[in-house]
Amino acid sequence: MRFTLIAIVIVAAQFAQADRTIFLPNARKYGAKQLYTELNWSNVNRKSIGYVGIGLGQSFEGELQLDRTRTKDWLGSFNFAFNYLEPLKDILPGIAVGIRDVFNQHPDGRSLYVALTFANSTDSYAPVEVTLGAMTGPSSGGFVGIMIPFSEVLTVSAEADRRRITTGFALTPMRGLKARIMLRQNETLWGASYSVRF
């Protein structure tokens, strides 16, 4: 039984499609040799947030993060994650640990985190994913996220930490391409992302 579970995890990791719940981490990972880019624009202070990431082997993920506002030019930092286990639907949660903002350039500051992601069967198109986690740093404390896929095209998400609540709607018009609208406090963000295997 143990070897069967290990084999399922390895196979699932090959085809996993990760994304943060919205901005907070979860325990999904990008597969090996998968590259993604994401750019978000805000209606507040002409803020932009960009990401370029890559799956590194079966368990690691590296991500360059770029932030810009009207008063500050692009600031770059790096996020790194180790995904110990992919979530197995209705059996085991995914487990990930990582460090955000390695260079301590992001407005939220450097933080270490651990995240558990549960994939639960429902009547929806795909499993509902619930993430529970904790982080250190300026945003220290617990966080929670939920992703509800209604179809191949529409996913609704929400997340919260001790500083803010964010909700989002994502449209996937074609494989690898995603468009989002996100709402948090007085801020509206629009985003687009694309992922590809090489």
Image (cartoon, rainbow, N blue to C red):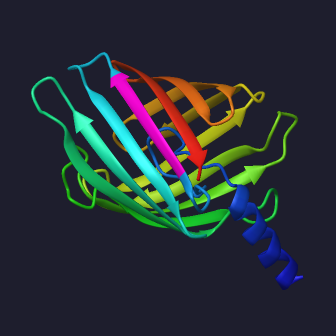
Residue 148 part of the magenta segment: no
Quadrant including the N terminus: bottom right
Question: In percent of the image, x 70 and y 34: which residue is there?
Answer: 148
Question: In percent of the image, x 55 and y 24: which residue is there?
Answer: 179
Measuring from the top left, give residue 170's x and y in whole percent: 60, 26
Using the image as rendered, state which of residue 13 and residue 44 is in the foreground. Answer: 13
Using the image as rendered, state which of residue 196 and residue 79 is in the foreground. Answer: 196
Using the image as rendered, state which of residue 163 and residue 18 is in the foreground. Answer: 18
Question: In percent of the image, x 81 and y 75: which residue is there?
Answer: 7
Q: Give the vertical position of 152 relative to 55 (above or below).
A: above
Q: How many marks?
A: 0
The answer, for residue 58, to whether it is visible in the render is: yes
Measuring from the top left, give residue 135's x and y in whole percent: 39, 59
Left or right of 131 in this view: 134: left
Measuring from the top left, give residue 192's x and y in whole percent: 48, 27
Q: Give the vertical position of 159 relative to 92 (above or below).
A: above
The answer, for residue 87, to whether it is visible in the render is: no
Left or right of 78 in this view: 1: right
Q: Give the vertical position of 179 relative to 84 (above or below).
A: above
Question: In percent of the image, x 67 and y 29: which residue is there?
Answer: 155
Q: Quadrant of residue 30?
A: bottom right
Measuring from the top left, give residue 102's x and y in whole percent: 27, 61
Secondary structure mostly seen in the magenta stretch: strand
Residue interval drawn in magenta: 35-41
Q: Give the vertical position of 84 relative to 87 (above or below).
A: below
Q: Which residue of the protein is positioned furthest toward the front in this rendering?
A: 198
Left or right of 59 in this view: 185: left
